[in-house]
Amino acid sequence: MSLGCITPLASAMVGMRLPLHKPPPIHHNPFTKLYPSRRRVAQIPINMAFITTDEQGITRRIGNHHPNLWDDDFLQSLPKSYDAPCYGERAEKVIKEIKGMFNALPLHSSSADDLYKRLSMVDDLERLGIDRHFQTEIKAALDYVYRYWDDMNGIGCGRESPCTDLNTTALGFRILRLHRYGVSSGVLQQFKSKDGQFLYSNNQSNEKDLRSILNLFRASLIAFPKEQVLDDAKSFSTAYLKQALPNINNTNLSKEIKFNLEYGWHTNVPRLEARTYIDIYGDVKTSNSIFNSKLLELAKLDFNMIQSIQQRELQILSRWWTESGLGKLEFARHRHVEFYFWAAGGCIEPKYSTFRIGFAKMATFVTCLDDIYDTYGTLDELKVFTEAIKRWDFASLEGLPEFMKLTFKVFDEGLRDMAREAEKTQGRDTLDYARKAWEVYIDAYFQEAKWLAMGYMPSLEEYLENGKVSSGARVVTLQPILSLDVPLSSDVIKEIDYPSRFDELLCLTLRLRGDTKTFKAEADRGEVVSCITCYMKDHPGSTEEDALEYLNSLIDENLKELNWEYLKPDSVPIISKDHAYVLSKGLQLLYKERDGFSVSGIDTKNLITKTMIEPVPM
């Protein structure tokens, strides 16, 4: 989702209008693309694989994206094996049994590890993906722990422990903060020596010490801006765990550490964590107690039942995709299954089907529009197309290519459908509100198309101001959020939607993360304007490595601020923030190594197969 910048191709090859400013002299090779040099850009040969001529003889750029990986017949044949009522009945029975065990915990235990035990139970429920069934019990357990929390010293294993404990304090800090209890990261200062280094054991095969450092690492990821102790904790624990890994005899602890180091927090979506932790938990804890075996049984049942729901929704989405005709747009990325995975990785409540399917549709529209504006459309076409969308008038598309008419038709119908769903919850028509958001988004895309035609290289600030809109994060999130079963007043919407800082950070992290992973592939297609090239223009003599170092640091700081905006107390219903925030995590996951949408290769397919296709063995 980034810009293209091909002045000679724009005017001579793609049928675009002549540049508004005279471009630099063109060398003999007509197939050129522009590369950054202050406001203008220098020329390098364009890859001919990204040039095509349509049936009308218009030469266009294309992305050369690979086709859809998910055959509709395969999706329609998914068995939904855990649809039968007997599984739900068994799950309800196990839930009642687990609640009984929770409630049997004494209110004022004298156990030496009662605080750690409660925290560990909550942590297991959340990592296994079944915490939504036990919200009352979790609240009671955390209220109990918080009563004994000391903001200077943290807590020990039990409420009567004479000494604070790193493992319990780090685990407690993380869980309490994520549940919006007011806890300070300063509690971790006591575990540092006078020279500022964290105290630790040299015995890196000691399981207890390793688990303490692992929980310190996990705690360090839930950082707010300017929490130096958490930055220090992250650096220390990361290095310690990586060094310790070769010496760990416990295979399952090793797996747990590897998973946390690889996926951290911002790329660790709930469904992936649940599927991974079910395997780890099954090997480690089921022999410890009836409680643990019950948790594992419920986790497996719940995972498979949710998976059956997701498979049914995938079938609905795939039928919509086929019937919409969007598959005829051969130049566009066909990634509706990947978009569904993006939403379903964090939103698992059965009743939120509209959210998951709606998000996948909105993301599909964004991708089709992205490929039209970035590569396939000519500037003259895009001008008319933009004006037609902003008037929401299909008749205004007269004379435009069929691919634009089809995109507009399906896009407009999709927005209307989502507005009808949102009205059921919001009690009012939100179509005009959603359309205004899309109009701003389309303007941002058209601005990028004009930059392309002019051969203009914006500053990083100018690029990001436009890019946080053209990232599409707001428009793909807005209507699905409005479809949740929580009415949002206009004032409350503004705290999660534009112009809130929460919304701005979601959009910025999408733009920044996307550009850092896609700029090389997009440069091959002629789309050379990105955060990286704009930074290099602003800092003459800098390298790609310099730009990436700065931008990755900027992403880290934005994610810390996003943590704060997500967890701070305000009037926004938590469920709305939860679902918007977890969409950000899904994006971070799919852009973890590269653009997991444009190149939906084996890694992305394996994630989808693991979480949505293959059930957990019972």
Image (cartoon, grey):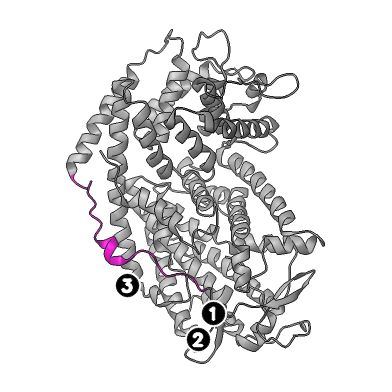
Q: Please tell me whether residue 220 is drawn above or below residue 141 in the rendered image.
A: below
What type of secondary structure mainly makes up the magenta span? loop
* Residues at discs 1 and 2 in contact (Cβ within 8 Å): yes
Q: Earlier in the sequence, mark 3 or mark 2?
A: 3
Whole-percent x and y of residue 434?
50, 62
> 10 Å neighbourhood of mark 1: few (<14), some, or many (≥20)?
many
Identify the residue at image location x=53%, y=47%: 492
Q: Is residue 149 magenta?
A: no
Q: Quickly name the residue at label 1.
A: 385
- Between the C-alphas of marks 1 and 2, the distance is 8 Å
x 54%, y 54%: residue? 591
SS at circle 2:
loop
Graded by Cα atoms within 10 Å as few (under 14), some (14 to 19) or many (20 or more), the crowding at tag 3 reads: few
Mark 2 neighbour density, 10 Å: few (under 14) some (14–19) many (20 or more): some
Amino acid marked by disc 2: Leu
Residue type, label 1: Phe
Q: Position of residue 579 (x, y in %)?
A: 46, 47
Q: Name the image quarter holding the C terminus.
A: top left
Q: Based on the displayed image, in which of its 4 quarters is residue 416 positioned?
A: bottom left
Q: Does 73 appear in magenta?
A: yes
Name the residue nearer the viewer: 158 or 387: 158
Give the quadrant of residue 561. top right
Q: Amino acid at mark 3?
A: Glu
Residue 426 visible within the image: no
Q: Which residues are magenta?
A: 64-84
Q: Can the viewer see residue 611? A: yes
Q: Nearer the viewer, residue 76 or 417?
A: 76
Helix, strand or loop for disc 3: helix
Which residue matches tag 2? 400
Question: What is the x, y in percent for residue 429?
Answer: 43, 61
The residue labelled by disc 3 is: 323
